[in-house]
Amino acid sequence: MVMVTAWPCVFSYDGPLCRAIHIVTKIKAGGDILCLLSKYLHWDRVPPGNICSTITSTLNALLEDKRLTFQKSRWYGEDLCPTAWDYVFSLDLLCAQLGWMWTDTHVIRKSVWLILNTWLLETQTKRWQFRNVSVAAVIRLLGRLGQQGIKENLAASVENLTKSIIEFGTQKVLEDMPWEVQLSLIYASHDLAPSNPKATLKTLQLWQQKFTKPVPPAVTKCISQISFLSSHMDQKKPNNFL
């Protein structure tokens, strides 16, 4: 009974991550546990919501929330604020329930790339619809989502996302992309690197040569890790005998 009385406290926080946890918990619960949770978390009166519509509304909220900011970090240089990370983790959790292929088709291709391409056009017209912090959060989200595909052993599919991230960054990183967004591209590329470590390493090294600001320790660590992964995968390749 102690656990039962604690459930409302654990799930009582208002925010996108809490809503995502409610939805996933209801999906996974069954039998008596589902009945108890429905009663003590009041799901009978206020259902957690539909997972697909919640993904859409959470992504829209990430773009519209004016509270989102960057925050200084000794390790990352510029990091997302906790509220922004709540959106990223919420979307990551919800999409994980539907699998990488669904996520790639319905979230990344239909929504996320539209946001990023719109932002690229905005940098040319100076008519801003999306804030830099929202764009950086969306890019970090791509890194998180791509890791789902890697975990599902669909690295070949994730490699297409990695190439797209590299192409997106190359279009602007050599010009006037905000430093905070550049960093988000580096960290997302690191998350996706297992799908193509050699190409990712080459790109990050080229970007690094163009940086005009001091490189945070996390960037150096990311490049070092990808370099190790790239060399390790080369060692595992079979020898070709002619």
Image (cartoon, rainbow, N blue to C red):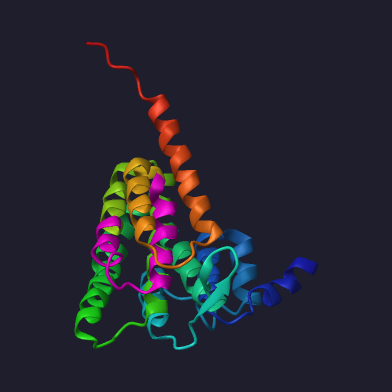
Q: Is residue 234 left or right of residue 85?
A: left
Provide the major secondary structure of the magenta segment. helix
Q: What stretch is highlighted in magenta?
A: 166-193
Quarter that holds the N terminus: bottom right
Q: Which residue lies furthest to the top in this view?
A: 242
| Nearer the observer, 209 or 165 | 209
Vertical side of 228 occupied by 158: above or below: below
Q: In this view, does 205 lie to the left or right of 172?
A: right
Residue pictured at 49% horizontal, 45% vertical: 224
Q: Is residue 226 magenta?
A: no
x then y, percent, for residue 234? 38, 29
Q: Position of residue 148 (x, y in %)?
A: 42, 52
Q: Where is residue 216 in the image (x, y as percent from the top left)?
A: 52, 62
Q: Looking at the image, which is closer to me, 185 or 89?
A: 185
Q: Tell me which residue sits at (39%, 70%) in the image.
A: 181
Does residue 137 appear to the left or right of 44 in the view shown? left
Q: Is residue 86 left or right of residue 146?
A: right
Q: Which quarter of the picture shows residue 242?
A: top left
Query: Which residue occupies 49% across, 87% down?
Result: 67
Q: Residue at x 75, y 74 (%)?
A: 5
Quick one: 190 or 160, which is closer to the camera? 190
